Structures are given as structure tokens and as C-alpha cells.
Image (spheres, rainbow, N blue to C red):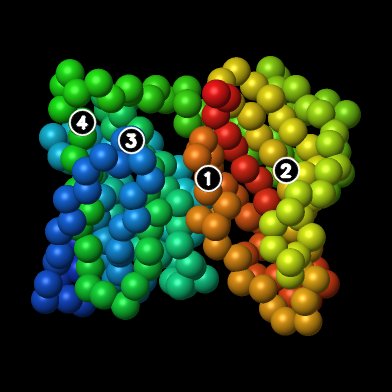
Amino acid sequence: MKLQLSKIALFISSIFLTTSTFAAQHITKADQETVQVTVSNTEPNVLVVDGRRIVNLVPSDVTALDTLPDKEQGTLYFKISPYFQNTPITLFVTDDEGTRYKLVLQPRSVGAEEVVLVPPKPGAGTSKRSQSYLQQIKELMYVMGDDAENPQETLAVDGISRSFVKAEIPLWKESKFVLLRRYDTDGMYGEMYQLTNLTNKTMNLLEQEFYRKGVSAVSIQNLTLSPGRSTFVYVVRENN
């Protein structure tokens, strides 16, 4: 416990040593729609749910954030990893009452940011997403990643069915976009695409470019694509 408190104290101290302004953003409706949030790309930031505790956090790439949870306060301190300092990061956050929030972090050259998520008001009609919702997303992403290079005879997670598609989907004239496989489970499904750069220039990809209505999560194997190279794109959607 003393070690944990010492780490948190050092992390918090670095905020005041590196910036004179600790800006606070109060974010509403992130439980209903994806909200873009500006954060510092070099300094510590803090994530808070107003009046509640953070119990789970799922970034689009597990290497994108260096995190330090304050378990006593239910808050989360984080810094953007060097490789992602100019890259949007999708983030799913769940609080201790089961409400799920969806953010797209936009790293910028600004001071440390405090991001305060405002939960829905009781009786406002917003549905609370359970922990199992995030678990389904993680399982689909894991299965697709495990199955990408060499399709497995048996999938890594039970209860997910796979179908082979191999259909080209119109996307951009500079690329070839092929739906390779679909993975179905209760309430949602995953799609594995292969995106090929057809140009003679490097292609820089953003996960937010693949978000559409009904899309719950997107993960791209390689965000920077050299000429002629391909990458896998994983998309999780909710069943209508």
C-alpha cells in the first residue's frame, strides 16, 4: 500500500512540476456517443468519473497508455506512450455502477488535462452497459488477432462462430479493402479486414476513420502502411 501511494504521489507531483495549469474538462453524454477529448501528449493526465469509481479501462491498443490507477480514489492517471503522441486513441471506460463511456483521446501539445466524465442522471433513460459488454469486445478482438495470420481450426474463445467471406469492400481509391472473415457472438460480431496500400507513398491510418453507426470498437494492426504493404483492420459491431 505504501509503495502504491508513493507511486501515485510521484506521478501527481510530476504534474505540478511540468505545468502550471491543470485544465479540467467535464465530459457529458460519453455513455451515449463517442466523445473526442484533448489530452496532453507528453505530460500526465487524470481520468475521473464524477461521483463514481473507474473499475475498467480498455484502450484500442494496450501499448498506447502508461497508466497508474489510484484504487482508493477510483481515478486513473495516464501518459501517452511516445509512439502514440500524435495518434488518436479509442478508450472504453466502465465505472462501478456499470456505465460504459467511449472516448477518442486526441493527444496535443498542451498541459496536463483532467478529464471528468459526467455519469447519466438517474431515470434519464440511458442504458447501463455491464462488464460483460466490454468482455465481449475484448474476446472478439483477441480471437481475431489470434486468427489473423494463420486461421485456427479451433478458435481461442468458446461461443464465437466464424465464417470466411473474402469480399472486396469499396473504401478509398488508394487502397484495396477486403473483408476476410466474420466472427459472431451474442449481441455483437467482429469483422476482420485486410487493407493494402496501392500507392507509392506511405499511408497513415486513423482508427476513427473506420467508425460508423453501430461500430463499438476498431483496432488496426499497423497505423503506418508503406507502399504495397497490407495490415489487418479489426471492427466490432453491435447486432441491430
Q: In front of the other: label 1 or label 3? A: 1
Residue 13: x and y in percent read 17, 66
Task: Kindly report the distance in space between the C-alpha atoms of the residues bearing marks 4 and 1.
Answer: 23 Å
List the residue tagged with mark 3: 32
List the residue tagged with mark 2: 192
Could you tell whether 31 is left or right of 172 in the image? left
List the residue tagged with mark 1: 212
Q: On screen, 71 above or below 114?
A: above
Q: On screen, 195 above or below 239?
A: below
Residue 24: x and y in percent read 15, 59
Q: On screen, 158 above or below 166?
A: above
Asked which secondary structure carries label 1, the reply is loop
- Residue 93, picture quadrant: top left
Q: At label 1, which amino acid type do we have?
A: Arg
Residue 47: x and y in percent read 26, 50
- Of callouts 4 and 1, the N-terminal one: 4
- Of callouts 1 and 2, the N-terminal one: 2
Task: Kindly report the distance in space between the C-alpha atoms of the residues bearing marks 3 and 2.
Answer: 26 Å
- Residue 184, picture quadrant: top right
Could you tell whether 174 is left or right of 189 in the image? right
Asked which secondary structure carries label 2, the reply is strand
Q: At label 3, which amino acid type do we have?
A: Gln
- Of callouts 1 and 3, the N-terminal one: 3
Task: Kindly report the distance in space between the C-alpha atoms of the residues bearing marks 1 and 3.
Answer: 14 Å
List the residue tagged with mark 4: 120
Residue 5 visible in the current orientation: no
- Of callouts 2 and 4, the N-terminal one: 4
